[in-house]
Image (cartoon, coloured by chain):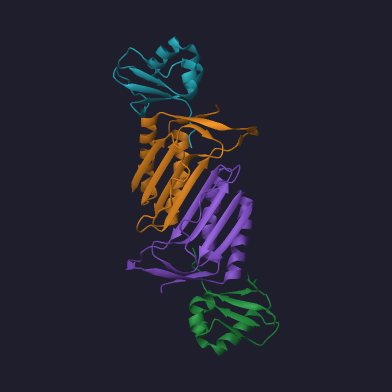
Chain colours: A orange, B cyan, C purple, D green
């Protein structure tokens, strides 16, 4: 499984085209977006901070581990850091696989693990 | 060894990183050193994990003079 | 939940931009792609046929039913019919929701139900 | 009533649609009519569902003269 992990300060919009890997039957693109409110409070932006080298390594470790249960063709993760305005994406994940079940499983589990273990933090500015 | 602080722990320590003299420290010994210097860190100890050179430390792991040790408060990425 | 269902003879590539509904925190875009082989046999294309009015109604019914368990902001389904070449998408599903769990749940269950109940058929030319 | 054939059933019947005289037919009576005209349909009966006016027919449903009845072989969309 081809694994690509990036942490960037640039906007993620329009960057991940749902290109198809040769032979893939399923492509899933997930965008996690900063919502304009949190617990009823209006929110203009969030500041994301990462322990970058470990965050990258940890994402790769998680994906390599999950690829044994959910073998996919490729996965690309882009996590944005710095200030992310409401309505903009903080993360984009793109998975291509032969069959959809593996892509769905990998995506759901990866997002759960990301939120448990990857050293990235968001705070209100 | 080099200590890294993130998120709210950076506010508590007032710095993003610092150096601590010590070698072959247990997690408990390291925490004792840190909370002696920043007593307010103690309130975060329970929910903070330690990473050694970019990997979560296992229980019983020992921290050396050349290690980079990160204090990882609960994460919230995604 | 806003539901849009379309059956078209046009290619689906590049049509579904992951635009964000105001207030959504998660956007998932799924593409189901014709694979260049099936059971070890090379495949150049598949022909899709639909009982169009019922297929549209059935997809809407399934989505309306699933929206009670997985309340999302919007869902768009585009299913292509006619000849679809290997490497091209036969279906695109785009779901926006406040939280990712609802979008993931709706997507997985919808695809399962589609393959059970929606009167669309594929055949090798 | 109007009968619609799809996918392999279109090949079996040799047409995409046809008209059948009848009113208030049960599913069994309808199948008897259809397999009398196209004996090869009988092999598909077990795995073919009937839809009445665009909705899967419930068991016991009755088919009227003005209905559009579709024979739905196992689907394979997506």
D26 sits to left or right of B41: right
- Residue A119, image x, y percentages: 43, 31
Residue at coordinates 34% horizontally, 57% vertically from top-left?
A22
The answer to whether one can see residue B41 in this image is: no
Numbered-mark total: 0
Residue at coordinates 39% horizontally, 45% vertically from top-left?
A76
Residue at coordinates 42% horizontally, 62% vertically from top-left?
C88
Between D24 and C120, the one nearer to me in the picture? C120
- Residue A125, image x, y percentages: 55, 26
Q: Relative to B39, does residue A103 appear above or below in the rendering?
A: below
- Residue C13, image x, y percentages: 46, 58
Q: Relative to C58, does residue A17 appear above or below in the rendering?
A: above
Image quadrant containing the C terminus of chain C: bottom left
Farthest residue to the bottom: give it. Answer: D37
Between D63 and C107, the one nearer to me in the picture? C107
The answer to whether one can see residue C46 in this image is: yes
On the image, which quarter does residue C4 sit in? bottom right
Residue at coordinates 61% horizontally, 42% vertically from top-left?
C23
On the image, which quarter does residue D21 sit in? bottom right
D73 sits to left or right of B52: right
Between D29 and D5, the one nearer to me in the picture? D5
Q: Relative to C13, does residue B56 appear above or below in the rendering?
A: above
- Residue A110, image x, y percentages: 44, 42
Farthest residue to the top: give it. Answer: B36
A98 sits to left or right of B65: right
């Amino acid at each position: 499984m081809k694994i690509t992990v990036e942490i960037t300060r640039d906007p993620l919009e329009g960057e991940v085209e749902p290109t198809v890997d040769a032979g893939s039957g399923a492509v899933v693109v997930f965008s996690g977006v900063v919502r304009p409110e949190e617990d009823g409070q209006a929110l203009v932006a969030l500041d994301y901070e990462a322990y970058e080298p470990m965050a990258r390594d940890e994402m790769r470790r998680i994906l390599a581990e999950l690829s044994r249960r959910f073998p996919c063709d490729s996965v690309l993760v882009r996590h944005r850091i710095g200030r992310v305005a409401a309505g903009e994406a903080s993360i984009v994940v793109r998975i291509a696989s032969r069959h959809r079940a593996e892509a769905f499983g990998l995506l759901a589990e990866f997002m759960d693990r990301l939120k448990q273990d990857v050293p990235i933090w968001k705070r209100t500015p | 060894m080099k200590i890294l602080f993130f998120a709210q722990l950076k506010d508590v320590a007032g710095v993003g990183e610092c150096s601590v003299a010590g070698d072959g420290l247990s997690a408990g010994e390291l925490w004792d050193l840190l909370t002696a210097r920043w007593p307010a860190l103690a309130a975060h100890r329970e929910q903070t994990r330690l990473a050694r050179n970019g990997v979560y430390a296992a229980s019983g792991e020992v921290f050396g003079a050349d290690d980079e040790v990160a204090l990882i408060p609960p994460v919230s990425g995604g």
